[in-house]
Image (cartoon, rainbow, N blue to C red):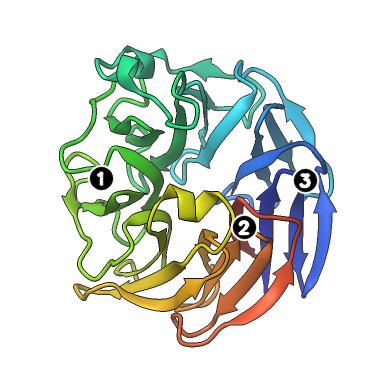
């Protein structure tokens, strides 16, 4: 059985057995993650109220202190040592090694030569950490995507950083890794899709078959790290400004081309997540709060829930 967590500004929705329960209401949830070793522990970043933690599967929440910027835009837990990372706007990265009780800012991120040029177009005076990818083998290896500033990398737990990596797209939206291919990393970005075979040190575009190049979400099959899905639109206006998005969800298997499995979508698919207990199964969450599931790698789809809007989605086996 699968439990879904969906984050939207009005609430965090918990979807289980076809039922929807709303929690953490009106706190501005925008990103979330589940501790890979402790599936009852959930972290939620909000637009203006900082970071929240649940230790009981979302039934109750505590606000964590220590992340000095209230706009938390990315949160991730290391599958190796359990370290918790929170990215913010303005672009900063914080780490906790005790489940959120205490925090330290990794100030080297802000010392990169390109940092003064980072700028998010809707708010050009600022930028934010949009995604944080953590290695399944090395607890010191971190890759962060800055919107808008590029993909940067640390090999020493965030003490020092390598600036924008060659071949990566600058407008990074989502980074994804997989335990079965620990050197591989994927990037969904404004401009296209890229992949790395050395965990973010170097990148190459992998866009063949993608007609739509404003790529937002990415999911990797639970079992097969070469079975990928992305969501995409023609540009940010179509994706985010309301109206008919004309978006699509694409699939790529092995070394093949991207092919659409859903297209001409009215609502933009903001979140894609693989089923943690079933190969070839995928969940997609749309901006209007509709969540659909495909049990067969995108061949067929069914609606599983409707929640009050959606920005992020996570799935755990229970």
The label number, if any, that marks residue 134 in the structure image: none
- Mark 2 = which residue? 287
Q: Left or right? Give the position of 218 relative to 281.
A: left
Q: Quadrant of the N terminus?
A: bottom right
Identify which residue is drawn at 45% across, 31% down: 129
**Disc 2/disc 3 C-alpha distance (Å):** 13 Å
* Residue 309 picture quarter: bottom right
Identify which residue is drawn at 24% across, 53% down: 195
- Mark 1 = which residue? 199
- Mark 3 = which residue? 10
Q: Left or right? Give the position of 221 relative to 282.
A: left
Q: Residue 281: x and y, percent?
A: 50, 77
Residue 77, relative to residue 184: is it above or below?
above
**Disc 1/disc 2 C-alpha distance (Å):** 30 Å
Identify which residue is drawn at 62% across, 58% down: 287
The earlier-in-sequence mark between 2 and 3 is 3
Residues 215 and 32: in front is 215
Q: Residue 147: x and y, percent?
A: 41, 34
Marks 2 & 3, CB-CB < 8 Å contact: no
Q: Residue 160: x and y, percent?
A: 29, 19
Q: Local crowd at mark 2 within 10 Å, few (<14), some, or many (≥20)?
A: many
Q: Local crowd at mark 3 within 10 Å, few (<14), some, or many (≥20)?
A: some
Residues 163 and 243: in front is 243
């Amino acid at each position: 059985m699968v439990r879904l967590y969906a984050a939207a500004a009005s609430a965090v929705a918990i979807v289980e057995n076809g039922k929807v329960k709303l929690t953490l209401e009106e706190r501005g949830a925008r990103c979330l993650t589940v501790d890979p070793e402790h599936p009852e522990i959930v972290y939620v970043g909000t637009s203006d109220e900082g970071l929240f933690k649940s230790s009981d599967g979302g039934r109750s929440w505590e606000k964590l202190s220590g992340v000095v910027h209230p706009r938390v835009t990315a949160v991730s837990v290391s599958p190796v040592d359990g370290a918790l990372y929170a990215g913010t706007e303005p672009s900063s990265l914080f780490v906790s090694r005790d489940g959120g009780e205490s925090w330290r800012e990794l100030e080297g991120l802000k010392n990169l030569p390109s940092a003064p040029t980072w700028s998010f177009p809707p708010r050009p005076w600022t930028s934010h950490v949009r995604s944080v990818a953590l290695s399944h083998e090395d607890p010191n290896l971190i890759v962060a995507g800055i919107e808008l500033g590029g993909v940067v990398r640390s090999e020493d737990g965030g003490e020092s950083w390598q600036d924008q990596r060659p071949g990566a797209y600058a407008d990074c939206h989502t980074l994804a890794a997989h335990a079965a291919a620990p050197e591989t990393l994927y990037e969904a970005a404004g401009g296209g899709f890229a992949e790395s075979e050395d965990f973010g040190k170097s990148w190459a575009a992998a866009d063949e078959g993608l007609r739509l190049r404003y790529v937002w979400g990415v999911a990797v099959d639970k079992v097969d790290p070469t079975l990928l899905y992305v969501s995409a639109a023609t540009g940010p206006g179509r994706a985010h400004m309301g109206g008919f998005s004309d978006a699509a969800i694409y699939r790529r298997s092995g070394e093949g081309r991207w092919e659409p499995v859903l297209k001409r979508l009215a609502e933009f698919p903001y979140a894609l997540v693989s089923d943690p207990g079933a190969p070839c199964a995928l969940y997609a969450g749309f901006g209007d709060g509709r969540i659909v599931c495909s049990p067969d790698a995108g061949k067929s789809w069914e609606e599983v829930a409707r929640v009050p809007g959606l920005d992020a989605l996570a799935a755990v086996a229970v």
